[in-house]
Image: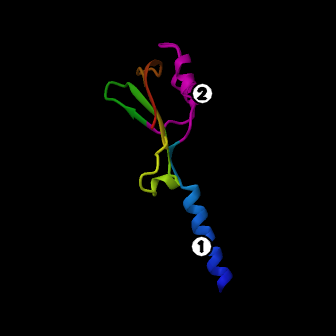
Amino acid sequence: MKNSLQLAVAIVFMLAVTGCATTIGKDYDQAKVGQFVPHQTTMDQVITALGQPQERETESDGTTRLHYQYVVAKGSVSDYVPFAPKSANTGSKDSYLYFDKSGRYLRAENTQSNQ
């Protein structure tokens, strides 16, 4: 019984020390977005380079927007200790890529942050 209690306490302590992480989306190479050529690169080429988007939206005029997103939020022990210094635990990147009705790349809007 005593060994079981010690093991349980050790497991809880290890979980608290290591923290936890939440991930949204699939990681992608945002630097590749700058290599796409307007009116030349196709949507299929973009998907081959970056993978499937998080979201795809087609407007009534036939234009399409692909949304790539990757967010990582990591918890740490300092999140639960009063007055402990906080470190950068969240990183995110978003890319919105726009295509004309024939599926040719038009432009991109990128954001990236580390907090």
- How crowded pointer 1 is (Cα within 10 Å; few <14, some 14-19, many 20+) is rated as few
At which x and y percent is residue 75?
Answer: 50, 52
In the rendered image, which quarter contains the N terminus?
bottom right
Residue type at numbered disc 2: Ala
> Does 18 sit left or right of 68 as displayed?
right
Viewer-nearest of discs 1 and 2 = 1
Q: Residue furthest right?
A: 3
Magenta residue check for 77: no
Residue 102: image quadrant is: top left
Provide residue 34's location: percent of width, then percent of height: 53, 18
Q: Earlier in the sequence, mark 1 or mark 2?
A: 1
> From this viewpoint, is residue 2 visible?
yes
Residue 111 in which image quadrant? top left
Magenta part of the chain: 26-55
Badge 2: residue crowd in 10 Å (few <14, some 14–19, many ≥20): some
Where is 69 relative to 82, above or below?
Answer: above
Question: Which residue is tagged 1?
Answer: 9
Percent of width and height locating residue 68: 48, 34
> Residue placed at 48% from the left, 13% from the top?
38
Q: Secondary structure at mark 2?
A: helix
Residue 36: within the magenta? yes
**Residue plotted at (51% across, 25% down):** 43
- Mark yes or no: residue 97 visible: no
Q: Residue furthest toward the bottom?
A: 1
Colouring scheme applied when the structure was drawn? rainbow
Location of residue 100 in the rendering, given as x and y in whole percent from the top left corner: 41, 20
Give the labeled residue for mark 2: 49
Where disc 1 sits, the SS reads: helix
Mark-to-mark CA distance, 1 and 2: 46 Å
